[in-house]
Amino acid sequence: MRRPLHPVALWLVASLPLGALHAEPEQVPPPEVRQLLPKGSQVLDWRSADLNADGRPDVLLIHEPVATTDDGPRTLVIALRQPDGRLAVVKHNDKVVYCRQCGGVFGDPYESIEASKGRFSVNHYGGSNWRWSNSFSFAYSRRDDTWQLVRVDESSFHTSAPDKMKSRIYKPPRDFGKIDIADFDPDHYKGVGPK
């Protein structure tokens, strides 16, 4: 039987610099992924997965301004593999990935993206004495030919009491309706979308 982590150990993990928690990109992106970048942008992270469940490897990409002083939008891009083998951008969102300064005292809140067949998630972690995290999960809808929000996980705790974490899960149709990835706003999703 595994013993639960001691509260001091939880506090130490919660106190790590965000850089220690950041997932590194899968690898250096190949030229076909770099070609998707607008001028003045760089890859923050990317994953290859069959995002629309058609048997071909697609790309989930996050790009941001090259200048570290530019706190402009970080854009999530979905590029699907076409029958001729090329990638084509089909969706993007400028709000789902938080800005460099949006993590409070903790700094950059971006943690990672995860991608698998027909689904992906965007994960953040930030705060100061009050730490918070969220994960926005999307799944492909064949009927609507798009990716829709299917789950939001939110957690928070105070560093003085890390064992008293508060967590909440939001799912459709109880908490929101159909929300396309292109329309998703992490600050305004509760009660949004047709049910």
Image (cartoon, helix red, strand yellow):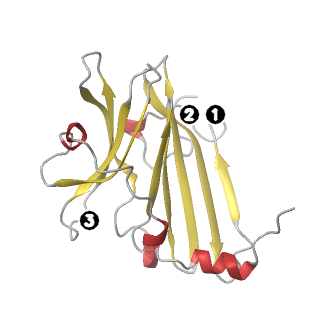
Give residue 89's position: percent from left, percent from top. Answer: 27, 32
Residue at point 42%, 26% (across, down): 146
Closer mark to the observer between disc 3 and disc 1:
3
Asked whether 94 or 173 is in front, the reply is 94
Residue 187 visible to an observer of this rendering: no
Q: Quadrant of the N terminus?
A: bottom right
- Label located before the other in sequence (3 or 2): 3
Amino acid type at mark 2 = Gly
Q: Determine the residue located farthest toward the left in the rendered image.
A: 39
Asked whether, in this view, residue 51 is left or right of residue 59, the answer is right
Helix, strand or loop at label 1? It is: loop
Closer mark to the observer between disc 3 and disc 2:
3
Residue at point 63%, 40% (across, down): 171
For residue 71, the mark is: 3
Separation of marks 3 and 2 at Cα, in angstroms: 31 Å
Residue denoted by label 2:
177
Amino acid type at mark 1 = Pro
Helix, strand or loop at label 3? It is: loop
Separation of marks 1 and 2 at Cα, in angstroms: 5 Å
Q: Quadrant of the C terminus?
A: top right
Residue 40 visible to an observer of this rendering: yes
Give residue 188's position: percent from left, percent from top. Answer: 47, 49
Asked whether 22 or 94 is in front, the reply is 22
Q: Residues within 10 Å of mark 2 (few under 14, many from 20)?
A: some
Look at the numbered discs 1 and 2 and tell me whether their residues touch, using CB distance below 8 Å: yes
Asked whether 13 or 193 is in front, the reply is 13
Look at the numbered discs 3 and 1 and tell me whether their residues touch, using CB distance below 8 Å: no
For residue 173, the mark is: 1
Q: Is residue 128 above or below residue 188?
A: below
Q: Residues within 10 Å of mark 3 (few under 14, many from 20)?
A: some
The image quarter in which residue 67 lies: bottom left
Q: Is residue 53 above or below residue 116?
A: above
